[in-house]
Image (cartoon, grey):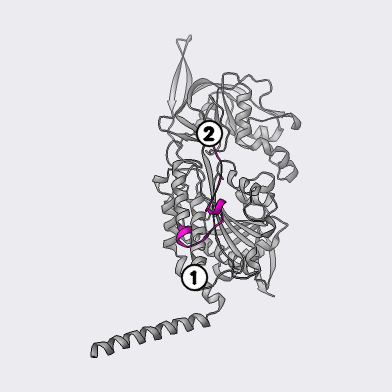
Amino acid sequence: MKKGLLLLSAILALGSLSSSAQRRTATMTDEEMYLDAMHRNITTEKIFGYVKQLSDPALEGRLAGSPGMAKAVDIVKGYFKEWKLIPRGENGSYIQLFPHPCVEIQPGSTMDILFPVTQDKKKTVWISKTYPWADGWFAGGMTSNGEVTADVVYAGFGVTAPELGYDDYKDIDVKGKIVLVEGETPNISRNPDSLAMWYKHTLHQTKLNNAAAHGAAGLLYKWVPGPNAPYNPGFVYCHVTDTVVNDIFRGTGKTYKETIRQIYKTQKPASFHTGKRAHIKMNATYNPNATGKNILGMIKGSDPILCNEYVIISAHLDHLGMIPFLIEGANDNNSSSAAMLGVAEALAKSKIKPKRSIIFMSVDGEEAGLTGSTYYTNHSLVPQNKVVAILNLEQVGVGEMLGANYHYKYPELAELSEKANDRYVHRRLFTSETHFLTRPRTDGAVFMKAGYPCIDLWALGGGYYHHPKDNTQSINPDILRAATEWLYWTTIFYSRQVTGYKKSRRVIALPGFLYLTDVVYVLS
């Protein structure tokens, strides 16, 4: 009897506690419920844990179309299922498939420079210098399998643009040679019209196709590595660093730095035979039937009318893969994927749901030329006119400050992101009317160009780009959590159409960035 009374008392006590918790929940404001969900689910340990999971060597650098990327897709899709996000891909799935041929690089790839040495004033012998991976070279992301040894010709920016009166290949024979070319173009204008005219010549595809069209046997590309290039059967190439380029220029009577300065100044090519040779060996396998995979999961809005409108959170999941060794891409772009997952979990587990529907989209193929976002804009899975905002994340794990790029047509995007930071995050924030539209460099720029109201969210303050040191050790967990909280509140504001702040600006200067402003909000 006594035991029965004790058991009854325990049950009543639990019921009382449960009722008390329910009463507390019932009396909590919307803001308090959102804060509760944030503090429970957006922690430094949890968000950084997502970064580490996606940076695992077993994922092999997440090259779009590769088996390693398939493992990463399964991880993200698994979380969407666990949190009961509604599938918003094709045919009731979480996945949107699109064609995405890829090249997988294997160990055994090498790059050497050969220097001529004259013996006995008659005989010339070639001395080979081997350069270590990363410090000297990276494999070309879409290189053909093969090997070539040939004279090196410096061909400036590798541009042939008769419509612009510029041709790096004019009056220089590169047939059977290996050409050394620079990234970007000699155009240093920030004028949007000028950038637009030169845009196609900035593309890796254009440079490699142009070298092949002029009969080159291979290419040394002074640019950061990436898979964004065409596949030309029999054409091998690799990326090289300043160390290699300066060695090639040594003994020519020219310096690399001065040559580039003169091209910029005169807007005239400065191509020449370097007197050096290069040996490129690439061990690569081409898969023409590989596919890209965008992943989409949705939290349905709670408002019977606004639920038919969408806020899309996007972050690219892919990176460079093995070229031929691992580059984790912890900041680019696992930090953003982690922030997106953190917000998805917090909103999915919140006691209150957003009024508008929220779609979380893990984008594939960004590194290979923005292919996943481009495919989505051409094959959208929700009506474009129902998308009130896209919040695109790019590299939010390194630095001390937050940043936002937006199109000048949609200043309200910046206003709400600034409000979210001012009210809840309290980090220094810079905003910029993006100049990416004329030469897109992020998925956000693709969305903007397609007419979506979009903002790029990012972090400032250094870090390594397309480099082995972009690893989990480089991540600043503090800015990562701050960026996640910033995204969380920006999403909530846009899902609820919160207003009531007005903006005052003062222009500031920060080297390397344009149109930057420090923003202060006051209650209106």
Residue appearing at x 60%, y 68% in the figure: 422
The segment highlighted magenta reads 79-100
Residue 37 disc label: 1
Residue 216 percent location from the top left of the image: 58, 22
Badge 1 element? helix
Residue 67 percent location from the top left of the image: 44, 42
Instruction: Count how many numbered circles sit on residues in the image.
Output: 2
Look at the image and say whether residue 370 sits in the magenta stretch.
no
Query: Can see residue 258?
Result: yes
Query: Can see residue 155?
Result: no
Q: Pointer 2: what residue? A: 288
Q: Nearer the viewer, residue 30 or 474?
A: 30
Residue 157 percent location from the top left of the image: 63, 32
**How busy is the neighbourhood of tag 1: few (under 14 within 10 Å), some, or many (20 plus)?**
many
Q: Is residue 317 left or right of residue 387?
A: left
Q: Nearer the viewer, residue 420 or 250?
A: 420
Q: Is residue 57 above or below residue 166?
A: below
